Image (spheres, rainbow, N blue to C red):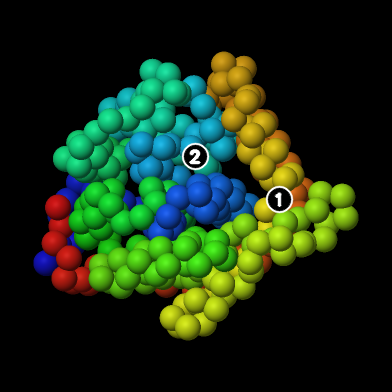
């Protein structure tokens, strides 16, 4: 039976209280923006909350851009890779992504399955996360090699792993979300709940939400499948502008671990909390925190082999 101390991944993650995998059945549903908001909201949920964000969307890494960290490089220490901290010297919001390893942000990642598997294992085993309350893992759309690698490598800490499913209200997205749900059930990963993203359009002038697209499909799916419905999020142009502005920032203007980095990060968090979406997402996080399992002190046999 695998225990948390049996593997390099288990030893590295033994100080992480909760691991939350954010997944979606198809691309284009705003999964990475949900992951970014989840990380920011969890960090703001407590004065001492420590959050990590692991971007395993290897061919389309976007978390660094959304956190305003594009262009930063990963540093090696005697104890492994050092995460890039979005809040500078505070070191309460760390991020790791293949985007930090590319020479140019427009470079493509053309890897076969074995190399993807090795990269994910290295992210899990070699990153110096330290003590974390939450590790948010942003995954690629669908159920692919990356998802299988995650499940296999995290087998020793499986009892601390949960998932959040992101969908849009449209029938095609819901059908693919069902496939994602099927994957979590097949791998015995508990689902904390479902988020319906892009549910209506939020008018930037009056704040009224117009259902220009279909709505309610995610809530109906959650009811039908016995899932917790965490909430719905409209298309918010203010939020889109905020994330676009983060992408456009000059990474050379802020040092990775300096006071300037801390100031910029708090500015990003403060600006996010002023958006119309932030209160809606806070309600989602409140439900999610209630759904998290108690902190596990012993690892039970899950029937999944450790890689």
Q: Nearer the viewer, residue 7 or 15?
A: 7
Bin the neighbour count of mark 1 within 10 Å (Cα to Cα): few under 14, some 14-19, many 20 and up. Answer: some
Distance of mark 1 from mark 2, alpha carbons?
18 Å
Q: Quadrant of residue 120?
A: top left
Q: Is residue 207 above or below residue 185?
A: above
> Which residue does the numbered mark 1 point to in the structure image?
236
214 horizontally vs 84: left or right: right
Q: Quadrant of residue 130?
A: top left
The spot of residue 81 in percent (x, y) is 33, 31
Q: Quadrant of residue 260?
A: top right
**Helix, strand or loop at mark 2:** helix
The spot of residue 57 in percent (x, y) is 38, 42
> Which residue does the numbered mark 2 point to in the structure image?
63
88 horizontally vs 135: left or right: right
Quadrant housing the N terminus = bottom left
The spot of residue 65 in percent (x, y) is 54, 33
Q: Residue at x 63, y 24 (%)?
A: 249
């Amino acid at each position: 039976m695998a225990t948390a101390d049996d593997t390099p991944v288990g030893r590295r993650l033994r100080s992480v209280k909760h691991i939350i995998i954010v997944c979606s059945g198809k691309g284009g549903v705003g999964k990475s923006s949900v992951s970014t908001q989840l990380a920011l909201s969890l960090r703001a949920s407590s004065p001492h909350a420590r959050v990590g964000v692991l971007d395993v969307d290897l061919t389309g890494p976007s978390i660094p851009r959304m956190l305003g960290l594009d262009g930063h490089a990963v540093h090696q220490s005697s104890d492994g890779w050092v995460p890039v901290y979005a809040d500078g010297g505070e070191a309460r919001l760390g991020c790791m992504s293949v985007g930090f390893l590319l020479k140019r942000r427009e470079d493509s990642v053309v890897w076969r399955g074995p190399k993807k598997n090795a990269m994910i294992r290295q992210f899990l085993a070699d990153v110096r996360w330290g003590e974390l309350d939450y590790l948010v893992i942003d995954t690629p759309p669908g159920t692919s090699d990356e998802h299988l690698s995650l499940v296999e490598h995290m087998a020793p800490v499986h009892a601390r792993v949960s998932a959040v499913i992101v969908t849009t209200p449209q029938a095609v997205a819901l059908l693919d979300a069902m496939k994602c749900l099927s994957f979590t059930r097949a791998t015995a990963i508990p689902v904390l709940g479902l988020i319906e993203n892009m549910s209506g359009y939020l008018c930037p002038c009056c704040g009224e939400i117009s259902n220009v697209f279909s709505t309610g499909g995610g809530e109906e799916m959650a009811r039908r499948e016995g899932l917790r419905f965490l909430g719905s999020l409209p298309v918010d142009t203010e939020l889109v502008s905020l994330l676009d502005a983060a992408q456009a920032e000059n990474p050379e203007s802020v040092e990775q671990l300096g006071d300037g980095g801390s100031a910029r990060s708090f500015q990003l968090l403060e600006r996010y909390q002023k958006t119309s979406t932030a209160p809606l997402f806070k309600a989602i996080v409140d439900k999610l925190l209630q759904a998290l399992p108690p902190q596990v002190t012993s690892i039970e046999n899950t029937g999944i082999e450790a890689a």
